[in-house]
Amino acid sequence: MISFLSGKIISKKNTIILQPEGIGIGYEIFCPGQIIAKNSVNQHLELWISHIVKEESENLYGFETESDKEAFEKLLSVSGVGPKVGLSLITKLGFDGIANAIQNEDITSLSKAPGLGKKGASKIVLELKGKLVTQDTIQKSFSNSNNSLSPFEEQLLQGLLGLGFAKNISETVTLEIIKDYKEKGQQINEKNLPIALKSALERLAR
C-alpha cells in the first residue's frame, strides 16, 4: 500500500498527477481543493496518501498533513460517507475544523459538504465524537498541574514514537488509552505499560 509520495507535478486538473524523481511513472491523486489550487505544474510536492482498493477501483487520495489523512480515513469509516464527501470536508474545514465540529456537535458546519446533509452530519458526530482530537486539546489533556506528562504517559508516548509513529498520532492514541483506563477504573502505572502499549498498537492497526 502507498502511504506517502514525493515528486514533481506533471499535470493537474481535477486531480494531480505526481511523478516521483527518477522513475517514469506518474500517480494520479485525488486531493482537497486547496492543494490543487495552490500548487503548479513542475512544482515539487509531498503528500500523505490514503490508498483505497476496491473490487472495481483503486484510487489514491493525497493530503498535506498526516492529520488530514487521518481525518479523511476516519470519515470514511462512517457508513454512507464516501471519498468525495471526505475530500469536501477536508477542503472546507481541515483537521481541526472537523474535529471541533464533531466535538461541539456542529451539524451545520459539517452538513455544508456537498452530498452529506444534516442526517449524514449527525451520523458523523455520533460515530466519531472523541475519536478526532485537535493538537490543542491533546496538549491540554496531557498537562497536569505542573504542565508536564506523568511517567506513564511519557513512557507510552515515547514507546510509540520509538516505533516510528508520528507525534500527533502517538499523542492522540496515548490520550485515548489514558481515557479508557480512567473510565474503566483501572490503575495507571508503569506495571501496566506493556498492556497499554499493546492496546495502542491494536488501535493503530485498525
Image: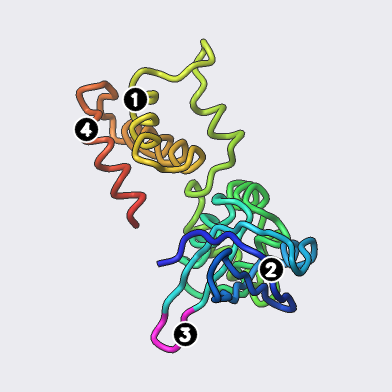
Q: Residues within 10 Å of mark 4 (few under 14, many from 20)?
A: few
Q: CA distance from mark 2 to mark 1?
A: 41 Å
The residue beneath circle 1 is 155
Give, as a three-letter code, the residue at label 4: Pro
**Residue sitting at 42 percent across and 77 percent down?**
53
Between label 3 and label 4, give the one nearer the viewer. Answer: 3
Q: CA distance from mark 4 to mark 2?
A: 44 Å
State which region is magenta.
Answer: 54-58
The residue beneath circle 4 is 194
SS under mark 4: helix
Q: In the image, is residue 57 above or below residue 61?
A: below
Query: Is 55 a magenta residue?
Result: yes
SS under mark 1: helix
Instruction: Indicate which disc residue 9 carries.
Output: 2
Q: Earlier in the sequence, mark 2 or mark 1?
A: 2
Image quadrant occupied by the N terminus? bottom left
Q: Earlier in the sequence, mark 3 or mark 1?
A: 3
Q: Which is nearer the eye, 159 or 95?
A: 159
Q: Residues within 10 Å of mark 1 (few under 14, many from 20)?
A: some
Q: Which is nearer the eye, 70 or 64?
A: 64
The residue beneath circle 3 is 57
